[in-house]
Amino acid sequence: MNEPLVFLPGMMCDARLFWPQLMEFGRDRAVMVAPVTGASSIGAIAAQVLDASPNRFALAGLSMGGIVAMEVLRRAPERVTRLALFDTSPLPETPQVAADREPQIVAVRSGRLASMMREEIGPRCLAPGPNRGEILNLVVDMAETLGPDVFVAQSRALQRRPDQQKVLRTTRVPTLVLCGEYDQIYPVKRHEFMAELIPNADLHVVEGAGHLPTLEQPTLTNKILRDWLETPLVLR
């Protein structure tokens, strides 16, 4: 039987981030999206994910979801059968990026969540193309659904996130590293570095996608994910 698949969404995103993947992979395995909300530290969020997940599972996380996925792997490596990291980074937050979050928090607390998300997501995250506006609208809608308190809690969690390079160096599960060619938040070179840390990692750069390849190029992303899911498991 195929092992269950757990997706972890990015910051201010919900299950809709993985809608094309839920439709594709839900036909032949148990699939769930575990929220990365409800706490203001990566460790606490990872603990919630582990509490909600099956005993053993394939794990895929995008952006903040990838950061949480690495912490899940650190805490319970025996439960993760394979790992996929999308548009993310194992490095701790730099002081400059951590400081840049403070005016964002002020803006969100003053009622400007939607406008701030449009300013941040549009030019930096999404590839040019006819679906860009539709995807941006969806991202803003997901953020408004989650609300300002979640934004603040997730911002605090990211500001204090741990360095996970050692975790990646020591993992032995089949690992996919995937990013969109237009991602400016975590660019391709960051993913090349991450893939070099991981023994036998499989690196894919998705053409025509930015920070959200699951929505921007779902057909190609699903094909890459299918290949990853069919990779033979490593005996421990």
Image (cartoon, rainbow, N blue to C red):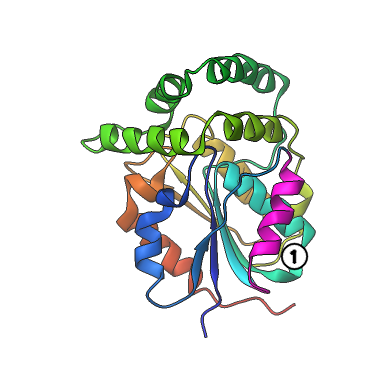
Q: Please tell me in which quadrant of the rendered image residue 202 appears.
A: bottom right
Does the magenta segment cover residue 51? yes
**Residue that numbered label 1 is attached to:** 77
Q: Position of residue 81 (x, y in %)?
A: 64, 71
Predominant SS along the magenta part: helix
Tell me if residue 168 can be seen: no
- Residue at image point 60% right, 50% down: 195
**In the displayed structure, would residue 126 be above or below residue 19?**
above
Q: Is residue 47 left or right of residue 209?
A: right
Point out the stretch of residues depicted in magenta. 41-56
Q: Residues within 10 Å of mark 1 (few under 14, many from 20)?
A: some
Residue name at image x 43 percent, y 28 percent: 121
Left or right side of 79 for 225: left
**Image point (59%, 42%), residue name:** 64
Query: Relative to 48, does residue 149 appear above or below in the rendering?
Result: above
Residue 193 on the magenta segment: no
Horizontal and vertical percent for residue 226? Answer: 42, 68
Residue in the image at 35% along x and 38% along y: 138
Mark 1 secondary-structure assignment: helix
Q: Is residue 77 above or below residue 88?
A: below
- Given residues 185 and 198, the one toward you in this image is 185
Dot 1 amino acid type: Pro
Q: Residue furthest left?
A: 130
Left or right, residue 210 beside residue 96: left
